[in-house]
Amino acid sequence: MAAQKSHLTYNEVVASVPFLAQEEQLGLLQVLSSVLTKTVSASSIQKHSLLELEGLGAGPWSGNVEEYIQTERNAWN
């Protein structure tokens, strides 16, 4: 007689975690980490360059710098 496979839902798995022994919980964490590591490829992670930040924050400094600084200082009072 062939064994039937049962499919647990996400909620059923999550609900069962507190009932697992600590070693089983750590094992489950290792399995999940391994599965995620295999499915997330380095090419799917968008890399950014520090140069993308160039020019950010330039707006406040484009006018009267002394006025801007005084406004900021007054905001703290």
Image (tube, helix red, strand yellow):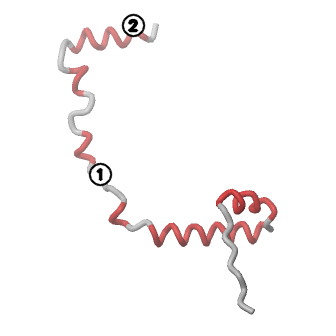
Q: Which mark is residue 16?
A: none
* Point 39% across, 68% down: residue: 41
Quickly name the residue at label 2.
Answer: 74
* Point 24% across, 11% down: residue: 66
Q: Earlier in the sequence, mark 1 or mark 2?
A: 1
In this view, the residue in front, 17 or 59, is 17
| Residue 52 found in image quarter | top left
Q: Secondary structure at mark 2?
A: helix
In this view, the residue in front, 66 or 57, is 57
Left or right: 25 in relation to 67: right
Q: Amino acid at mark 1?
A: His
| Residue 33 found in image quarter | bottom right
**Residue 9: % across, % down:** 66, 62
Left or right: 13 in relation to 56: right
Quickly name the residue at label 1.
Answer: 48
**Residue 40: % across, % down:** 43, 66
Q: Neighbour class for label 1 at 10 Å: few (<14), some, many (≥20)?
A: few
Q: Nearer the viewer, mark 1 or mark 2?
A: 1
Q: CA distance from mark 1 to mark 2?
A: 36 Å
Using the image, determine if residue 75 lies above or below residue 19. above
Q: How many marks?
A: 2
Q: Amino acid at mark 2?
A: Asn
In this view, the residue in front, 11 or 36, is 11
**Residue 21: % across, % down:** 80, 68
Q: Neighbour class for label 2 at 10 Å: few (<14), some, many (≥20)?
A: few
